[in-house]
Amino acid sequence: MHNFSLRKKARAGREEMDVSEQFKTSFSLPPEQQAIRDKCFHPSGEFVEFPIEDVETSIPARFEKIARMYPDRNALTFKDRTFSYKELNEAANRVAWAVAKICGDKNEPVAVLLEQGAMAVVAIFGVLKAGGIYAPLDTDFPSRRLNTLLEDSTAAVILTNSRNLPLAETLAANRATLLNIDDLGLSTENLELPLRPTTLAAIIYTSGSSGQPKGIIQDHRNLLHLVMRSTNFYRLSPHDRIALLRSFSVSGGTLHMLNALLNGAELLPFDLKQEGLTNLAKWLIEAQITTCSLTPRTLRHLTEALNENESLSKLRRITLSGEPLYNTEMEACRKYFSPDCVFVNSLGATEIPFAAQYVIDNQVLPERSLVPVGFPATDIEIRLVQENGIDVKAGEIGEIIVRSRYLASGYWRSPELTRQKFLPDPMGGDERSYLTGDVGRFLPDGALLHLGRKDHLVKIRGYRVSILEIETTLLENQRLKEVAVTVWDREAGDRYLAAYLVAAAKQAPTMTELLTFLRARLPDYMIPTTFLFLKSLPQTNGKVDRQALPCPDGIRPNLDQAYTAPTSAIETNLVRAWEEVLGVHPVGIHDDFLDLGGNSLTASRLISRLVKTLRLELPIKALFESPTVAEMAKIVEQHQAKSARKGELERLLTEVGAMSEEDADKFLAMEKCTNRSRRQA
């Protein structure tokens, strides 16, 4: 049965709010978005809204309610093992009684050291039923990291199985009690513990900026509200077969597990690390998965692995998150997915999962190259602020701030970090604001465009530049498969952009072709100074590892203009000056100054150097009128006999310094155009 009455937060006086304010709050989707979302139903048509009342209970209470409603329905299938809801509830109860026997009714952390699969689900629900806080430990992590996580969690109990018992014994080291889930034989009855919505439920660790992992705490209310807003948005059905592709050590694993098991659907874990992408397509087809969540990179590899005759026609909804999504990655989806399949690009973090969403029709490619993350979810507000905390103006980039009653509880054993990132309501209400550290921009229709991390918003020659916008533009070039852009410091005050590229074809574009492509789309200050082609980009956990990107080597780029060595003493001296100022070697006498990464700042330095060393009168515009060493050598020869007066030298040295960065760049662009027109004439 269809039930369209999705609950939205009521706000007094909403009709009187201006448009920009409405875009910050939870509101109905625009008509075109709503039309796409209306396709998001299981073919059975059965959907029961997740009521707000259940948010104010506990995860075990909701799960036991579902288990009573659907005792014989399949709840969990992993490989050859299937649990009905009755069997899963009983298995979790055995774990709960064992944990309670050790911990009593204390709300304490319990480490779960199990590989991806059915028993990890059993263990997690058992911990929650016992009133504990589950802290998942990924068995693939190195022992040093596992030790760090276990010590930080202060878990007094480690839940494991026979396979991982040796590892668990090493980690425990007399500081934790071991429970082997394979040997439990206690009661299968519900404990019926009176858990409150504010009872802590999970500690999920993520990498911290300090180099140490940080544990994000979630209580039952927050997780239930997360399930409520995703259930009602995706219209999850008891007939859905939901893939679990994420590890339980990340928030996505928890969300997909709860989405299935708190709605009567069937959860099907797939160990992506063990099975690999080559087997994923086959499994999705054979398991008849209806909903799943992928990273854009995984989606791309998935479509590449499918053959002409394969089709993922059963998939009705795919959520994409974790990386930027580009419209080019949606092209192959028309061929392999059902016309009724709905894609959802989403924004979230462990602190506030599923905060915004943007629905995509499989038959219509998004207009923008970079796909928006969309509109705020139920009971969530999104603001963009400047560094001083003031809202940005329309169309400007700002830090993304998420405001809600349903944020994570904070950081485990880190009260100072919690105070820094989670701000209380200045009016004394129960809503808080989370500083995401991400940046974005509102589009004219109110959709949010996610532009990466705040530390990827850099200043180049006085301009604020979004790294992601440059990467997005580069990916519009169909001869490029993957890109990453980062910033480097050549010397004090001289920051420059480097682009790392993976070609999509055997014949990679030349530097000249790339520059021509970018100059038609970006201002000069957003064009990378250097380009490096790699066989692949370094990755960590499926994302580009920017710290592992190699330092630019300063090798002359692959220009259309062939390298020509200097033939005179003047040309040799000029080449040496260009190489030292630009950090490029070797420089050919016919190479264009701008094509080698030159800009207004390096132009000023080069002219100042030539004025000092060659003792000649040389205005900065001479460099843009004669942008090659060969052309500059002719000017030097013409001026070699002249000596510049002191006043003229001071004027030349301060000519560019007197300009603003913006004026210098405009001057550079005008001189470049004028020069090219002269040369063409």
Image (tube, rainbow, N blue to C red):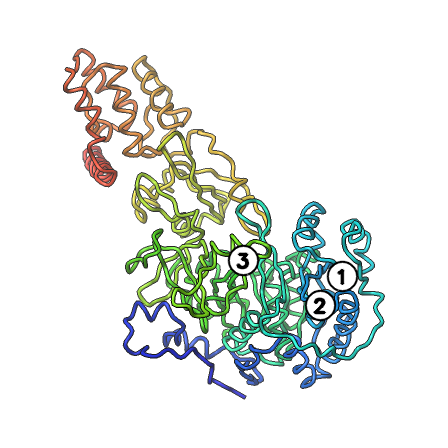
Quadrant in which residue 528 is drawn: top left
Name the residue: 46% across, 85% down.
5
Query: Hey, what amino acid is under mark 2?
Result: Val
- Please give the name of the residue rendered at 30% of the width and 58% of the height, measured from the top-left corner: 395
Rendered residue at 54%/40% (across/down): 548
Judged left or right of residue 283, residue 575 is: left
Q: Are marks 2 and 1 in contact (CB under 8 Å)?
A: yes
Query: Mark 1 or mark 2, which is nearer the start of the sequence?
Result: 2
Which residue matches tag 3?
A: 300
477 to 619, vertically: above or below: below
Note whether 237 is above or below 414 in the view shown.
Answer: below
Q: Secondary structure at mark 2?
A: helix
Visible in this render: residue 321? Answer: yes
Specify few, some or many for label 1: CA neighbours under 10 Å numbering under 14, 14-19, or 20 or more: many
Query: Which of the 4 image quarters holds residue 372?
Result: bottom left
Name the residue nearer the viewer: 531 or 27.
27
Mark 3 is surrounded, within 10 Å at the Cα level, by few (under 14), some (14 to 19) or many (20 or more) other residues, namely: some
Label 3 element class: helix
Indicate the amino acid at tag 3.
Arg
Q: To which residue does mark 2 refer?
A: 127
Left or right: where does residue 5 sit relative to residue 86? Answer: left
Residue beneath disc 1: 159
Tell me residue 262's x, y (percent).
62, 77
Q: Using the image, tell me which numbered label, if any, was put on residue 402.
A: none
What's the distance in space between the residues labelled 2 and 1, CA to CA?
Answer: 9 Å
Q: Nearer the viewer, mark 3 or mark 2?
A: 2
Q: In x, y percent, where is residue 647?
A: 14, 19
